[in-house]
Amino acid sequence: MNGKKALEITEILEKTYPNAKPALTYGSVFELLVAVILSAQCTDERVNKVTDVLFKRANTPQEMAKMNIEELEKYIFSCGLYHSKAEHIISASKDIVEKFNGEVPSDLENLRSLAGVGRKTANVVYSVGFNGNAIAVDTHVFRVAGRIGLSKGKNPLATEKDLMKRIPENEWSKMHHCLIWHGRKVCSARKPNCKGCSISSLCEYKNKEL
Ligand code: SF4
C-alpha cells in the first residue's frame, strides 16, 4: 500500500474515532503499567474491576515489589494467565525500585528493559503514559492492519515496522487506538462489518462483503 492511501485511511479512521483511547482505568503511570500487563488476553472491563480492588492494597512499585506472589495471584486470578502476570508485575516493580529509583522510566529503551515488560506493553505505556510516539501491535491491530493492507507482516514486530513506515510518526499513537477501536466495533475477528465500514473503499481485504 502506498503512503498516500495509508494517509487517507489514517485521516478517515481518526475522524471516525475522535475519542479513541484506552478503556483502562489508572491514576498513575505505574497503575497504567500494571493494568496493561493484566490486559493480555483479558477484557479492559475485567481488568478495571480487578485493579479497583488491587490498587487499594498496592499501587506503587515499592508496595507491589514487596507483595507475595500467592497474594497477588488471588487479586488478579480472574484476569487469566494469573501466575505469569503476577511474576511479571512483581519483577517489573522490583526493577523499577532497584534500577530506576522507584519511577517508571519514561523512555522506550528502559521501559522495554524492565523484567516482565514486553515490547507491546512498553509501547502502550510510552504512548499513553508519556505521550510518546509508538504503535503497540495487539491482536486487533495485527488483524485489522493486515486486512486493510497497511501491513503484510507475519508477526506483530513486522506489522509494527510496516505501520511505522506508512503512518506519520505523530499519528502512531492515535492510529494505534483507532485500529483497536475499529477492530472492536467494526472489523471484528469473526465477521467484519464491511458494509458499515468508513474505509471500505480503501481497504484491500480480499473477502470484503459489500
Ligand atoms: S472493509 Fe471490512 S475488512 Fe476492511 S477494514 Fe472495513 S470491516 Fe475490516
Image (cartoon, helix red, strand yellow):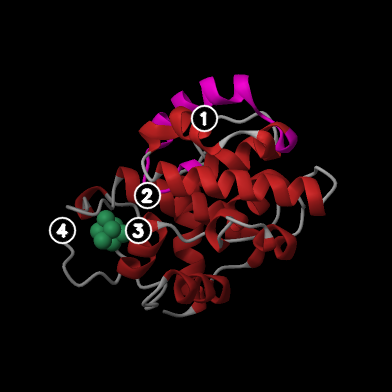
* Label 2 beta carbon less than 8 Å to ligand 1: yes
Q: Position of residue 91 (x, y in %)?
A: 63, 50
The correct choice, above or below, for 83 with respect to 79 in the image is below
* Label 3 beta carbon less than 8 Å to ligand 1: yes
Over which residues does the magenta segment extend? Answer: 38-62
Instruction: From the viewer's perspective, tell me whether residue 152 is left or right of residue 68.
Output: left
Query: Amino acid under label 3?
Result: Ile
Instruction: From the viewer's perspective, tell me whether residue 66 is left or right of residue 68.
Output: right
Q: Main secondary structure of the magenta part?
A: helix
Contact (Cβ within 8 Å) of mark 4 with mark 1: no
Calculate the distance from the C-alpha at mark 1 to the C-alpha at mark 3: 47 Å
Q: Nearer the viewer, residue 35 or 22?
A: 35
Magenta run includes residue 48: yes
Give the mark toward the camera: 4 or 1.
Answer: 1
Contact (Cβ within 8 Å) of mark 3 with mark 4: no
Q: Position of residue 82 (x, y in %)?
A: 42, 41
Residue tagged 2: 182
Magenta run includes residue 181: no
Q: Which mark is residue 71?
A: 1
Calculate the distance from the C-alpha at mark 3 to the C-alpha at mark 4: 12 Å
Query: Amino acid under label 2?
Result: His
* Label 4 beta carbon less than 8 Å to ligand 1: yes
Kindly indicate the quadrant of the structure image that contains residue 27: top right
Residue tagged 4: 210
Residue tagged 3: 199
